[in-house]
Amino acid sequence: MNRRTRVNITVDEELLKKAKTKLDLFGGKLSTLFNAYLRDFVESMDKEPYANKKESDIKIKELEKRIEKLEGRK
């Protein structure tokens, strides 16, 4: 059995309401949704081992830009 850890996160209130509304349509749980996205993120990052560092650096910069946009820093 997997150990579970409680995590406190801050999310956009309107987006959370919309997600909960859609989850309620089929009785889904918010924690299941977050676990699925975390699993997908980890698996996608593990999929492509980069042979050359330059390509890896480009992907990291791209990911940093996406995170900044999501956090509203840009």
Image (cartoon, helix red, strand yellow):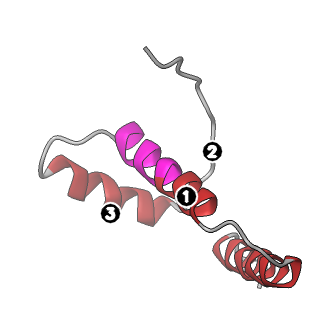
Q: At 24% across and 56% down in the image, what residue appears?
A: 21
- Which region shows up in magenta? 30-39
Q: Disc 1 versus disc 2: distance between alpha carbons? A: 17 Å
Q: Which residue is under mark 2? A: 9
Disc 3 residue crowd, few under 14, some 14–19, many 20+, Cα 10 Å = few
Q: Helix, strand, or loop for circle 3? A: helix
Residue underneath mark 1: 41
Dot 1 alpha-carbon crowd within 10 angstroms: few under 14, some 14 to 19, many 20 or more = few
Q: Position of residue 68 (x, y in %)?
A: 75, 75
Query: What's the residue type where badge 2 is placed?
Result: Ile
Work out how far the residue at label 3 is from the one at label 1, CA to CA, in angstroms.
22 Å
| Residue 48 forms part of the magenta stretch | no
- Closer to the camera: disc 3 or disc 1? 1
In the image, farthest residue toward the front? 51
Residue 12 percent coordinates (x, y)? 54, 62
Q: Residue at x 53, y 17 (%)?
A: 3
Q: What's the amino acid at mark 1?
A: Phe
Q: Residue under circle 3? A: 18
Q: Earlier in the sequence, mark 1 or mark 2?
A: 2
Front-lying residue, 22 or 41:
41
Residue 59: which disc? Answer: none
Judged from the image, the secondary structure of the residue bearing numbered disc 1 is helix
Q: CA distance from mark 3 to mark 2?
A: 17 Å
The residue under the point 77% across, 85% down is 74
Residue drawn at 62 percent across, 61 percent down: 45
Q: Mark 2 falls on what kind of element?
A: loop
